Image: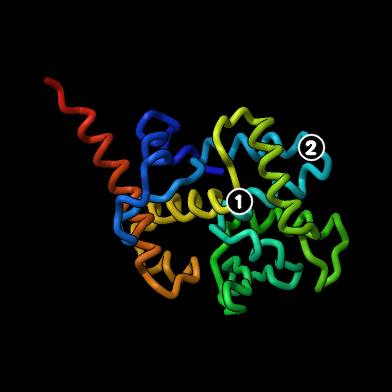
Amino acid sequence: MSTELIPIDKNTQIVNKMPYRQHSDSTRPVSFLTEAEVNALAAAAKEMRDGERNELLILTTFQCALRISEVLQITKQHRQVIDGKHRLFILGKGNKPRVIAIPEALSYRLGDFIGRSQLADTDKLFPISRQRAWRVIKECAIKAGINRRVYCHLLRHGGALARLKRSGNPKSLQIHLGHSDIKMTMRYLSTLQLMESLEIEDRAKF
């Protein structure tokens, strides 16, 4: 994975603890996991039973910014390389299909895992229940020493913020995430702007 996007500092913690109900839908910041926290979760997962599978579950949810229900549906045939571009075919909320870009390095790791696991085309990469996935994330958070409530959707939020930081394109992110209303996508932009504002205003010396 790349270097940390947003450091775990006082500003990140402030955003994650804000009283969100005071904000309108499009400006309400989201709680999220930083890349450093995700790296810590992934490292903890490797030391557990089914370590590689759990690590890839965490990385796929974060780097592709997917809902956990979407990740758990992924099969061998959903990962494809088209004209040299790595893609995942996703069945999203409301059974709406979409095609998303997957980081090349992660795609190759999934391909290696599929090959060694000898999965058939329709075999799920992560054959576990939603409840089990939540427990895996929770156990990894405890093992990684992350002292706050951690759940699967924080990985999606963190991945969405990381993607928006890299692309700067909310509309593209909306399509990637499968949002029917851009208001939810704009919450990620508001969160990044809040983080940047805090960092800039910290420089004001009196």
Of the residues shown, which amino acid type is indicated by label 2? Met
Q: Callout 2 environment at 10 Å: few (<14), some (14 to 19), or many (20+)?
A: some
Residue 62: horizontal and vertical position, in percent? Answer: 57, 51
- Asked whether 146 or 166 is in front, the reply is 146
Residue that appears at 57% across and 39% down: 149
Residue assigned mark 1: 152
Choose top left, top right, bottom left or bottom right for residue 136: top right
Of the residues shown, which amino acid type is indicated by label 1? Cys
Residue assigned mark 2: 48
Q: Is residue 194 left or right of residue 133?
A: left
Badge 1 element: helix
Residue that appears at 69% across and 71% down: 78
In the rendered image, the vertical position of residue 124 relative to residue 112, given as above or below:
below
Residue that appears at 54% across and 65% down: 101
Residue located farthest toward the left when viewing the structure as drawn: 206
- Asked whether 156 or 165 is in front, the reply is 156
The mark lying in front, picked from 1 and 2, is 1
Residue 13: horizontal and vertical position, in percent? Answer: 41, 34
Q: Determine the CA span between mark 1 and mark 2.
A: 18 Å
Looking at the rendered image, the quarter that the N terminus falls into is top right
- Asked whether 141 or 45 is in front, the reply is 141
Q: Is residue 81 left or right of residue 195?
A: right
Identify the mark at residue 200; answer none if there is no mark: none
